[in-house]
Amino acid sequence: MRVVIAGGSGFLGHALTRQLLAGGHRVSVLTRGEVSHQPGANVVLWDPNGSADIWARTLDGADAVVNLAGASIAGRRWTAAHKRLVHDSRIKATDSLVAGVAACRYPPSTFVQGSAVGYYGATLDDRPIDESGAPGSDFLAEVCVEWEAKAQAVSAHGCRLVTLRTGLVLAKKDGVLPPMALPFKLFAGGPVGTGRQYLSWIHVDDWVALVAWVIGNPDVVGAFNASAPQPVTNETFSRALGRALGRPYWLPAPAFAMRLLLGREMADCLILQGQRVVPTRALASGFLFQFTDVDEALGTLLTSNF
């Protein structure tokens, strides 16, 4: 297959590219900046505001496009400028990809649209949420709703559209796990806030496998929750993290400290509240998760050799 990954220089794009290349597929990575070299990948520098005809040259005849483009939501405090960057980087990139697809002589067969479990809104509600759940109304939910909606237009050009609402992706050296592990490594780990907020997680290997499964199964269409079948509370996750690192679990991080550090809106959306998301459609469609237990997942990623 020939797969085009927009935002392929990021953590998830890099992992997906590596796996696809290992499977003998051809990969083109669209990126706005320099990327670490991945032998075999075709790196294309792009500007989301560029001409649709330019992107059509890369997209034309591709088997699949995976849209992961977007600025990090956790890279800095949520100032008005950073929130605008989070929004615009996703919306403009998706607009340009849709325009590129429309300009293709042979449009891609499959379009995999990135999204996040933040679509459902941050809450302390412990009820499970499947793909039929209503969208939330906070900043991240509104971004996800608009982000997903922008991709809908590719269906008119014959693309099979699949949207992946991704949870917290766990990996050894990238993503959110290393900073989450740091307090435990310093013997200062514990629950955050009440500890009752749910955390919907997925092992990076399962996330990559799910994307490959989506691309390879033509009957798969629509929204899918890309998260493990057993979401856990922050307290349960923190205890599992301490066990995996051989460190104590004893020092809580109070809500007021998180709000002072990050600002109330960012702290509430990302840390102090969450979503109990379950991958109902993936399971019903036959996808098999390798990692369903958080202790096992963390045990494969973390060792005491830090």
Image: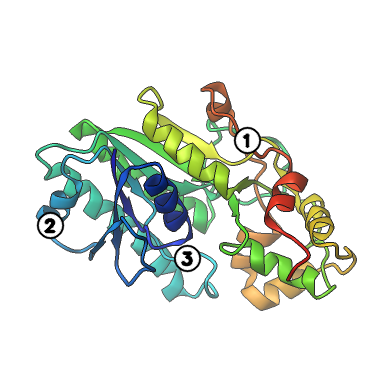
In the shown orientation, is residue 111 left or right of residue 165? left
Mark sitting on residue 54: 2
Residue 291 placement (x, y as % from top left): 66, 40
Residue picked out by circle 3: 72
Instruction: Name the residue located 65 percent from the left edge and 66 percent from the top edge.
Output: 178
**Residue 88: quadrant of the picture:** bottom left
Q: Please say whether residue 120 is visible from this viewpoint.
A: no
Q: Tell which of 124 and 174 is nearer to you.
A: 174
Instruction: Name the residue located 39 percent from the left edge and 53 percent from the top edge.
Output: 68
Distance from the alpha carbon under mark 2 to that under mark 3: 26 Å
Asked whether disc 3 touches disc 1, contact meaning CB atoms under 8 Å apart, the reply is no
In the shown orientation, is residue 232 left or right of residue 283? right
Between circles 2 and 3, the one closer to the viewer is 2
Dividing the image into 4 quarters, which one contains the C terminus? bottom right
Q: Secondary structure at mark 2?
A: helix
Q: Is residue 131 above or below residue 251?
A: above
Amino acid identity at mark 3: Ser
Crowding near the residue tagged with mark 2, few <14, some 14–19, many ≥20 C-alpha atoms within 10 Å: few
Mark sitting on residue 278: 1
Amino acid identity at mark 1: Val
Asked whether disc 2 touches disc 3, contact meaning CB atoms under 8 Å apart, the reply is no
Residue 134 placement (x, y as % from top left): 53, 37
Q: Tell which of 262 and 106 is nearer to you.
A: 106
Q: Secondary structure at mark 3?
A: loop
In the shown orientation, is residue 173 left or right of residue 17? right
Amino acid identity at mark 2: Ile
